[in-house]
Amino acid sequence: MTPSAIIRPARPSLRGALTYDERAALLFLAPLAIVLLAVAVFPILYSFYISLFSLRLTRPGRMPFVGLDNYLTVLSSPHFWQAVERTAYFSVLSVAAIVVLALLVALLLNEEFPGRRVLGALLLVPWAIPYVANALMWKWIYDSNYGALNGLLYQLDFINSYMVWLGDSPKTLPLIANAFVWKEVPLAAILLLVGLKTIPPDLHAAAKVDGANTVRRFFHITLPQLSTAFALVVVYETMMAIRHFDLFFILTEGGPGDASNVVAWRIYVETFRNLSFGTGAAMAYVLALATLALAYVIIRALARGI
Amino acid sequence: MTIAEATLSTPVRHYRTHSSTRRFGRAALLLVGSVLFLGYVLAPIAWLVSSSVQSEREIISKPPHWIPSAPTLQNFKAIFAAKDKAVTYETRRAADPASGGFIPSTASSLLPSMRNSLVVACAVVLLNLLVGVPAAYAMAKIHFRGRQASIYVILTTRVIPDIALVVPFFLFIRNLGLLDSLWSLIITYLAVTVPFSVFVLVSYFESLPDELDKAARVDGCSRLQTLLRVYLPLARPSLVAVILFAFLASWNEFLLALMFTQTPASQTLPIIVASFTSDFTISFSFINAAGVLAIIPPVILALIFERYIVSGLTAGAVKG
């Protein structure tokens, strides 16, 4: 970057095609462009390229071109589709819980009362802590021998003896979802709170004059006015849930059996444990495209509803 | 009674007769809501903290001691002492005198990993500012061809799941010979965090008046001078937000660190903490103390800079 090119005020450009502003913009954007091209755009394209080869680190030096075979292998595998089902179950469960809890939190924090600011600050705590610490915390809470969940339910007489939680297949995904929801609710609540603040107070005042009670005003004013914020939360949290990896790694490693073997976990195992980079990349590409398509569909569907 | 009177008087009367019960009901509802909220958000963390100051003997009591009867800092002492203790397969079979349980073989890496996390996070923050600020200013204030397109490109790079990038990232870093170095993390974290930083900054720059820009230009400022002298001082809240987001994202990141780091030379805190949890024979109290150490910096930052974070989050999210 030559500083003189920026500092010198608008002089007639020798290159003619670009104005001073455009050259300045080019220089300002260049570092970002280089970073994103090298570490985002190139990997995305390279990932597609790899997915066309049979690349196994257990067999270095040989990398035969196989075309779309990796995709066929992935898409025709019943294990892959079972993983897709688990990811879908986990995501729907999580996003539904996040939306409901975040709405309740946002409604609470939208009221004026003493202590509201303290609650608002505390809300950021789950958002800020690392997922690894979150996972460790819930692993300890769910522990079947000494965990807090067992202790609490036992003391409240809901259970007669300590139970197995994460190790019990039907409970595994809902319990992981619970840990995910706890960490994701704050951001969703903040986004919904912003939505609530943009509702013109006149709307509620007018409805009150018309005799609408709190419940009716909630369903006929608050909820419809929040639709954009809902769309944002649903799309964002769905994308987060589909790609989520950390909790699965620490809480269950895909187990027990295959109970929490979701797509993100499969990609990791295929790539770094089976060392099959070609099929791993193909699976990752399918996931990325599915995520984009899903985000598009959700936005379209919600936009039509608005 | 005319219609006008009826519509005016009914809600008013309705309001008066119920106002005191209503006010009481609202207060009760807010109180119940606040208590539930506090319980939901704080109970898991309180239990983590409570566990971290219990001895191994106390932590395995049934039912658990919610409030430790004999709080102790020995777990934290064990962490800070672990650096000097060579933990081998043989020695770790003997119960650690400090924590009363087994300490994990990776325990001695805990403090170096915190240092690694700190170095990476600070470098990522710095690079985010260097790369993000000029780009955001250009996108918000300079009218150039392809401005809209550049925003869409950045948007797209944000929605690609990081798990989808593991393979190319890994080969890329390996070919550069950067595996197991802090640079592998700094480079990839920069790419992962900078789009969000740009969104936060663009939406903030856009909220500042264009007239400042014109005035500075008329006074003979170059674009760079306009950015540095006029906009940067005004953009402080968004800079704070960007610094915090980049720092927290780097401090918390797990998946990429899991792939790129192999030895204590580059392993970050989440990797070491995660390595504790995979070992069931080790002291629960020790793991919990490590968990507490991992959450202290982010929690403190979040509580101090709450307002900046909330405004930054909403700006970045609405934009993205």
Image: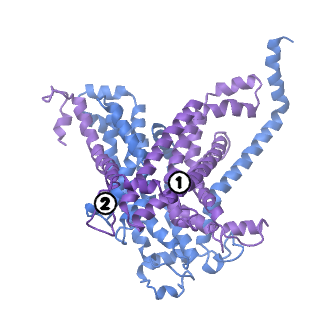
The residue at 67%/70% (across/down) is A164
Q: Is residue A72 above or below residue A276?
A: above
* Residue A18 in view (yes/no): yes
Chain identifier of the residue bearing label 2 in the image: B
The amino acid marked with disc number 1 is: Val
What's the colour of chain A in the image?
purple
Query: Residue A261 appears at what percent x and percent y?
Result: 53, 62
Mark number for residue A197? none
Residue at the disc numbered 1:
A84
Q: Secondary structure at mark 2?
A: helix
Q: Is residue B316 left or right of residue B263?
A: right
**Mark 1 surroundings: few (<14), some (14-19) or many (≥20) residues within 10 A:** some
The residue at 66%/39% (across/down) is A112
Mark number for residue B171? 2
On the image, which quarter does residue B184 sit in?
bottom left
Query: Residue A215 appears at what percent x and percent y?
Result: 75, 34
On the image, which quarter does residue B63 sit in?
bottom right
The amino acid marked with disc number 2 is: Leu
Quarter of the picture containing the N terminus of chain A is top left
